[in-house]
Image: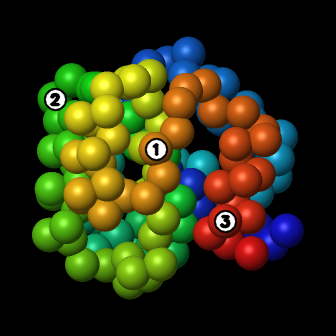
Amino acid sequence: MNKINSVLLVDDDEATNFISTLIIKRAGIANELLTARNGKDAIELLKNIESGDASAAGKAPNLILLDINMPVMDGFGFLQAYQKLDFPGKESVVIAVLTTSLNPRDEDLVKKAGVLDFLNKPLTGKVLEELLAKHFN
């Protein structure tokens, strides 16, 4: 399997980020792993890429793992703000929601926002492998 450039984890839960980071690093699937504690921080990171900020150049994520329930800006707010961004490579970015939500309404809203993958936490090696095979092979 080819390595992807970058993965962005957007989640406020430290334990979840720790587990997801461990799984992603062990799989060796990305050159870089970025994290944001809420949707607002993730949008700011992506805006830096959009503006051509030298420190963010080449860091556009290929995969975004997005939680729904977060403070400051939740996953739905992120998806709305994300639609307004324009940065190199955006058309090939895969967004997958990684959540504890079992609410069918949440899954429906996510799919209406154009996100095809609705995954349950915690991330596992098998789920990551399936996600990558689906989108990056």
The first of marks 2 and 1 along the sequence is 2
Residue hosting label 2: 72
**Residue 40 can be seen in this image:** no
Q: Position of residue 43 (x, y in %)?
A: 25, 53
Instruction: Look at 60% across and 25% down and name the residue there.
Output: 122
Task: Give yes or no for contact between labels 3 and 2 (Cβ–Cβ under 8 Å).
Answer: no
Q: How is the image coloured?
A: rainbow
| Image quadrant where one finds the C terminus | bottom right
The one nearer the camera, 40 or 48, is: 40
The one nearer the camera, 55 or 19, is: 19
**How many neighbours does mark 2 have within 10 angstroms: few (below 14), some (14-19), or many (20 or more)?**
few
| Image quadrant where one finds the N terminus | bottom right
The amino acid type of the residue labelled 3 equals Lys
* Residue 7, picture quadrant: bottom right
Instruction: Look at 78% across and 39% down and name the residue there.
Output: 125
Label 1 – label 3 distance at C-alpha? 13 Å
Residue hosting label 1: 118
Helix, strand or loop under label 2: loop
Q: Position of residue 41 (x, y in %)?
A: 27, 43
Residue hosting label 3: 134
Helix, strand or loop under label 1: strand
* Residue 49, picture quadrant: bottom left
For this view, does 133 lie left or right of residue 106? Answer: right
